[in-house]
Amino acid sequence: MLSFLYLALFVALPFSQAKLHRSKRSTCKLPSSTSSSNPQPTSTQSSGSRVAAAWYAGYHSSDFPLSSVSWNKYTHLTYSFALTTGDTSQLEFDSSDATLLPQFVKAAHSNNVKALVSVGGWGGSHFYSANVGSAANRTTFVKTLTDFASKYDIDGIDFDWEYPNAQGIGCNVLSPDDTTNFLSFLQELRQDPVGKKLILTAATSVLPWQGPNGSPLTDVSGFAKTLDWIEIMNYDVWGSWSDAVGPNAPLADACAPTQDGSATSAVAAWTAAGMPANQIVLGVPAYGHSFYVTKTAALSSSNAHTLNAYPAFDESKQPAGDKWDDAQGSPDGCGGTLAAPGGDITFWGLVDAGYLTSNGTAAPGIDYRFDACSQTPYVYNESTDVMVSFDDARSFAAKGQFIKSQKLLGFSMWEAGGDHNDILLDSIRGAVGF
Ligand SMILES: *[C@@H]1O[C@H](CO)[C@@H](O)[C@H](O)[C@H]1NC(C)=O
Ligand SMILES: *[C@@H]1O[C@H](CO)[C@@H](O)[C@H](O)[C@H]1NC(C)=O
Ligand SMILES: *[C@@H]1O[C@H](CO)[C@@H](O)[C@H](O)[C@H]1NC(C)=O
């Protein structure tokens, strides 16, 4: 089972995190002053409190400005992304992001929300391995990040390394020593007077990170001691790289035709490796994946307008998603261009494109199926032959109930700006019990 899930990881690599936002990137030189030499007692998050979080993509701020964030419904917001660079003493930002970050931190603090910054992402993890690759680099990287945290007055850092010792976007530096070095780096960061006070989190794949032998780590207790929590990115489990249309973010998959990963199996795998449930935040998606599916494949032959489960799709006709989707021909993050659109469509994009009404239910004339096994919905437009696997209020409620019953720490939504009228956010908050 585990080895099967592990194989699946390579075809189900999360595409959502960085969105290849490579235009107009500028290098942000960090200050060289040393931080406070007055050590403080370790103060990480109080274990009794729950996390209601989301990532805020700085590169979507023109469509989703800071003033549109429902600050009072969150405990933590994570600004995305600071990108790793080939110079361990520097991080990079999109040019607009560096000016927005101080406003983000100010808005968060004035709303009593903790402000974190995510380092890496799908398109920003190229140099993680090198940045933690030697004792000297780890010391430099600790200083880079603590200076950065002090400069911007942030409360925490989210490590979104996609992925230690496993290829993500296609051109990342990798080493068999990645997880060992990552842990050594985190331990050194915790020794730092600034680092010990920061909230430290990590966005992870559905299986524990890959150890030196290329298999998922069987003991992550060292990470549990140094990180406040992890966010399991339980999305992009099925997508255009799969054999059939399947759930973007399955809650469970024991009853599915193949076991490609789910919130249930991911939490089981991480807790078995030593990550306590109360240090696990479930990553939840405010978007879905689109597929071109013929009516013959999509529709039941006996029941008009009834959708089949796991239909085949036509790979050669990838539909475009919404305006935030990566267009065909845009940079692929490794020096090339994308041969097809990404096909990602946000929850608001589903409303805009007419699949859903403004209250988030299927629009008249749109076929809808709620998959009992994965606890996720599908919509299908019979005139365009486009099917979308996504999450709605019902699936977010199911995920919230799971968080509550498994005594997980909370949720984090990718991304805050993907929701529509807080339909998803309100649903999961209510189910978790905020
Ligand atoms: C240390 O970082 C530098 C860049 O700052 C990089 O060139 C070098 O390869 C790194 N060392 C290791 C062992 O990864
Ligand atoms: C959502 O909107 C549709 C059409 O506008 C309406 O028929 C339906 O009752 C609404 N559902 C809820 C839960 O408000
Ligand atoms: C299906 O998509 C087409 C093209 O976007 C749109 O015109 C049509 O209204 C959609 N069908 C329904 C039932 O919404």
Image: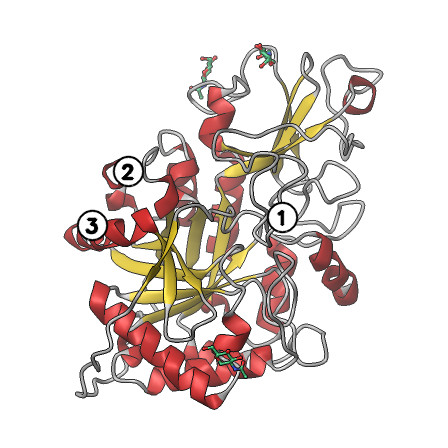
- Within-10-Å neighbours for mark 1: few <14, some 14–19, many 20+: few
Q: Residue 273 appears at what percent x and percent y?
A: 61, 75
Which quarter is ligand 3 in?
A: top right
Residue at the spot 39% in from the left edge and 78% down from the top edge = 141
Q: Could you tell me which secondary element the residue under label 2 belongs to?
A: loop
- Residue with the mark numbered 1: 336
- Residue with the mark numbered 3: 103
Give the spatial CA distance, label 1 vs label 2: 30 Å
Decide if residue 368 is on the left or right side of residue 26: right
- Within-10-Å neighbours for mark 2: few <14, some 14–19, many 20+: some
Label 2 sits on what residue type? Pro
Asked whether residue 111 appears in the rendered view, the answer is: yes
Q: Residue 43 appears at what percent x and percent y?
A: 27, 77
Label 1 sits on what residue type? Gly
Decide if residue 372 is on the left or right side of residue 137: right
- Within-10-Å neighbours for mark 3: few <14, some 14–19, many 20+: few
Q: For residue 9, what is the image quadrant?
A: bottom right
- Residue with the mark numbered 2: 65
